[in-house]
């Protein structure tokens, strides 16, 4: 495990900066063991990079159906991603299918058809071939890479967000505004085994914020969520709130819903560092901000500024390497800098 300290976090600076996308980057992912990263954008492009050299390895396109919510499978040359169509056809299920794509030979290994509206969240199990998808059709669907048949459906009352824990035993589903439910992945059909409340009601609308991002901490003890421009960290066992950060307010924005992502509609993402001691998020000031989970205080604002809003952020598993992708198509690879001498 990589153990980070405040000084190394503060020293992070771009080791590489890519401008290969011609539109907003809507998601990115690191492989869990190989030195590769994938990005997808609203320009229908998928870029594969070698992270230890900063080299662009491959560019592929999904021109007809677009691409979003990309995630590596267990193979470093295979990904699953959602469609992001610009013009609807007469077949919404086909429009919003997920695709299992071999990057090695640019072939589709399988299509996963079932959602009838835009998929907004995809989470791959770290231990099995199962994965989850959540969509604006107010459903969470369970899938297995080995078959294109849907394994199960969870009905929701709002557009949900989903996340597996790193053991693949539990998944979280934000099934209603201001609410997240935890399910046993092996017995989800029995219903959630616990439900946690998140946030407070808006004085104008009377509604609680909708969760747009959910991620378990590396040790599975905490659950990070983004809702209404605010980051919440809950105890994953008890449901009590450990920390709350108004990301928009602390980074120069309004702290509302889509926050600084603006016209792209790409909600801001937050992520954990590999040791679970810090959380990252892009800010309304076009910078990446880092907070301590232990103290709740901000420990760093990374100096380099994106041209747009860094709505996608991710820390590489087991490495001192992070990535941020922005609404103007730029992607930065962040590495710690050696201390200056003299």
Image (cartoon, rainbow, N blue to C red):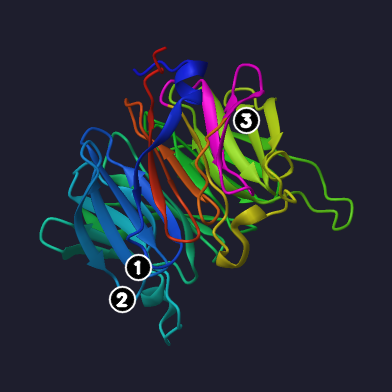
Crowdedness near tag 3: few (<14), some (14–19) or many (≥20) residues, C-alpha within 10 Å: many
Tell which of 252 and 165 is nearer to you: 252
Q: In the drawing, what numbered circle is on residue 233? A: 3
Residue furthest to the left:
105
- Residue identifier under label 1: 113
Closer to the chain start, of discs 1 and 2, is 2
In the image, 319: left or right of 286?
left
Q: In the drawing, what numbered circle is on residue 335? A: none
Crowdedness near tag 2: few (<14), some (14–19) or many (≥20) residues, C-alpha within 10 Å: few
Residue 295 horizontal/vertical position (percent): 65, 17
| Quadrant including the C terminus | top left
**Gap between marks 1 and 3 measured at Cα:** 33 Å
Which contiguous range is marked in magenta?
Answer: 274-300
Tell me if I can see residue 220 in this picture: no
Residue 35 horizontal/vertical position (percent): 22, 37
**Gap between marks 3 and 2 measured at Cα:** 38 Å
User: What residue is at 36 percent from the left and 20 percent from the top?
Assistant: 338
Q: Does the magenta stretch include residue 240?
A: no
**Gap between marks 1 and 2 measured at Cα:** 18 Å
| Quadrant including the N terminus | top left
In the image, 275: left or right of 310?
left
Closer to the chain start, of discs 3 and 2, is 2
Residue 292 horizontal/vertical position (percent): 59, 22
- Residue identifier under label 2: 63
Quarter assignment of residue 64? bottom left
User: What residue is at 64 percent from the left and 49 percent from the top?
Assistant: 284
Quarter assignment of residue 100? bottom left
């Amino acid at each position: 495990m990589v153990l980070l300290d405040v000084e190394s976090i503060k020293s992070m600076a771009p080791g590489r900066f890519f401008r290969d996308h011609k539109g907003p980057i809507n998601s990115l992912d690191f492989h869990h063991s190989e030195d590769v990263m994938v990005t997808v954008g609203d320009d229908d492009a998928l870029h594969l990079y070698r992270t230890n050299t900063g080299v662009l390895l491959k560019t592929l396109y999904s021109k007809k159906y677009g691409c979003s919510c990309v995630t590596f499978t267990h193979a470093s040359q295979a990904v699953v991603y959602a469609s992001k169509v610009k013009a609807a056809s007469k077949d919404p299920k086909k429009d919003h299918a997920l695709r299992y794509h071999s990057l090695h030979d640019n072939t589709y290994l399988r299509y996963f058809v079932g959602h009838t509206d835009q998929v907004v969240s995809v989470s791959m199990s770290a231990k099995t071939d199962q994965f989850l998808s959540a969509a604006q059709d107010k459903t969470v669907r369970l899938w297995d890479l080995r078959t294109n048949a849907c394994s199960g459906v969870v009905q929701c009352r709002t557009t949900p967000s989903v996340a597996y824990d790193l053991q693949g035993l539990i998944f979280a589903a934000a099934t209603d505004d201001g609410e997240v439910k935890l399910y046993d992945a092996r017995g989800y059909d029995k219903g959630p085994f616990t439900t946690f409340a998140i946030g407070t009601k808006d004085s104008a609308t009377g509604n609680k914020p909708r969760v747009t991002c959910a991620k378990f901490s590396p040790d599975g003890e905490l659950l990070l969520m983004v809702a209404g421009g605010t980051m919440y960290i809950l105890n994953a066992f008890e449901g009590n709130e450990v920390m709350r950060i108004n990301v928009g307010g602390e980074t120069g924005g309004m702290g509302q819903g889509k926050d600084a992502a603006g016209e792209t509609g790409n909600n801001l993402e937050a992520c954990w560092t590999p040791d679970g001691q810090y959380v990252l998020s892009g800010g309304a000031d076009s910078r990446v901000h880092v907070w301590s989970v232990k103290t709740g205080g901000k420990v760093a604002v990374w100096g380099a500024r994106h041209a747009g809003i860094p709505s996608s952020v991710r820390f590489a598993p087991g490495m001192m390497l992070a990535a941020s992708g922005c609404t103007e198509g730029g992607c930065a690879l962040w590495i710690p800098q050696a201390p200056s001498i003299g």
